Amino acid sequence: MDFSAAIPFLENNHRGVIGTQRPNGATHSSIVVCGVFQNKAAFVSVYPKSQKIINLRRNPLCTILAVTDNWREYVVIEGKAELLDYNNTNESKMRPLLRELYMACSGSPHPNWEEYDEAMVKQHAVIVLVEPEKVYGLLRS
């Protein structure tokens, strides 16, 4: 499957699971709210010291599985993650990126953008963008 076929699915289905590699090679799985952003699979982690972020900083290879509410359709994106945070990205760029990513992963605006911005700074949010290398799944027309 080509990533372009997965884009409409990711725009409408935001429940996901990310798989990262632990140091011993085992898979660490974590639930995420995901979407598509800048032609990549994406999500925000509000805990920069979470196991998924620690794993991605060490090894960017990961898998995102996005599913429908009834688990009957899904898309899997395998690729390398790029992490953007307040340490490697200017705050003036992070704010609009986080807002855009929120919209991409929820399909609706936040009820209080100022509150959201403040929380993202306080929590040291991390944007995760996954460059699709392999895409597969089950999409029904």
Image (cartoon, grey):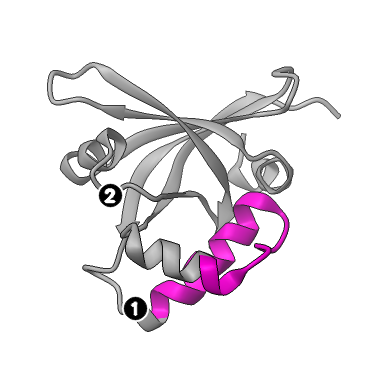
At 34% from the left edge and 63% from the top edge, which residue is drawn?
122
Q: Is residue 14 above or below residue 30?
A: below
Q: The N terminus appears in which quarter of the rendering?
A: top right
Q: Is residue 97 above or below residue 65?
A: below
- Residue 106, magenta (yes or no): yes
Question: Hey, which residue is sitting farthest bottom in the picture?
Answer: 92
Comparing 46 with 41, the one in front is 46
Q: Quadrant of residue 49?
A: top left
Work out whether mark 1 precedes mark 2 in sequence or the reverse, and give the earlier one.
2
Residue that carries the numbered disc 1 in the rendered image: 91
Q: Secondary structure at mark 2?
A: loop
Q: Report the number of numbered marks.
A: 2
Judged by its main secondary structure, the magenta piece is helix
Q: The C terminus appears in which quarter of the rendering?
A: top right
At 30% from the left edge and 63% from the top edge, which residue is drawn?
85
Comparing 67 with 138, the one in front is 67
Residue that carries the numbered disc 2 in the rendered image: 48
- Residue 13, magenta (yes or no): no
At 34% from the left edge and 78% from the top edge, which residue is drawn?
91
Q: Quadrant of residue 10?
A: top right
Amino acid of disc 1: Glu
Q: Secondary structure at mark 1?
A: helix
Q: Quadrant of residue 27?
A: top left
Q: Is residue 23 above or below residue 92?
A: above
Q: Where's residue 34, x and y in %?
A: 55, 43
Amino acid of disc 2: Pro
Distance CA(mark 1)–CA(mark 2) = 16 Å
Comparing 78 with 45, the one in front is 45
**Does residue 36 appear to the left or right of 63 in the view shown?**
right
Q: Is residue 31 above or below residue 90?
A: above
Q: Where's residue 90, x and y in %?
A: 30, 79
The range drawn in magenta is 93-115
